[in-house]
Amino acid sequence: MKIAGVVLAGGQSSRYGQPKMFELFAGRPLYRHSLLALQKNQLQPLIIATNASLQSKFVEENVEWIIEQQPHQGPLFALHNIMTNFPDVEWFFVIASDMPFINADFVQTMLTFIGDDFDAIVPKQDARLQPLAALYRRSALQKADQLVQQNKRSMKVLLDQLRVCYVPFEIENSTFININTQQDWPQTIEKETNYE
């Protein structure tokens, strides 16, 4: 069974003011934390989904690229595009490029929930879902395709139509902290002292 590792790195970073996936955390660009967590679990292929204006800023080799023809359409469009372009992959582990505390142990834990009964495996902190640190099965493509045709953008709307295994995590778990604005850094730097 083929499980791909996907880093979503095509966002506008409009609230941040510049492409945040290249900001350094613990000595690495943010997107590399997501990529390494997938790589350490031997997921293949490794895919970076981005847009043409950002691609040249990445320094990766041995990755596959999905370059969005229409940038900034959101993660549902990106997921649909990736699934369509990799027809031989059964599961896609999708991680956003702005989550500094994502690590290999988290990825390994999530992989243990893969099963035939589910179309998606999604972390959940109380009522808060984490659809951009989750696994999606090829069986989700049909629903994703329908939503894209309807110009729907919400990952939540997709999940509502799938058989989802929700994996509970503590609300204070720092794995899912993401960087949206420059103001998010102080709390993140504070937690960095406990990082790995």
Image (cartoon, rainbow, N blue to C red):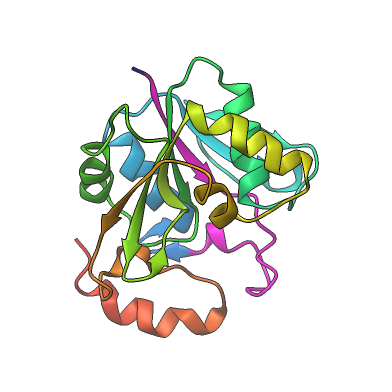
Relative height, residue 15 to residue 46 (above, below): below
Placement of the C terminus among the 4 image quadrants: bottom left
79 relative to 93 in the view: left or right: right
Can I make out residue 128 in this image? yes
Q: Is 11 on the left or on the right of 109, as rendered?
A: right
Q: Position of residue 41 (x, y in %)?
A: 26, 34
Find the magenta span and give its range: 2-23
**Percent of width and height locating residue 149:** 77, 39
Residue 89 vs 170, above or below: the answer is: above
Q: Is residue 166 above or below residue 66?
A: below
In-front residue for pair 10/163: 163
Q: Which quadrant of the view contains residue 25?
A: bottom left
State left or right for residue 31 relative to residue 73.
Answer: left
At x 57%, y 43%, the residue is 58
Q: Is residue 56 visible?
A: no
State which quarter of the image contains the N terminus. Answer: top left
Q: Tell me, yes or no, whether the highlighted magenta stretch contains residue 192.
A: no
Q: 100 or 138: which is nearer to us?
A: 138
Residue drawn at x 28%, y 44% as measured from the top left: 107
Q: In the visual, does 99 lie left or right of 172?
A: right
Query: Residue 100 in the image: x percent, y percent?
Result: 38, 62
Q: Is residue 22 magenta?
A: yes
Question: At 40% across and 84% down in the image, what residue appears?
Answer: 186
Question: Residue 108 falls in which quadrant of the image?
Answer: top left
- Residue 81 is situated, as x and y percent measured from the top left of the image, at 66, 33
Residue at 43 percent across and 22 percent down: it is 90
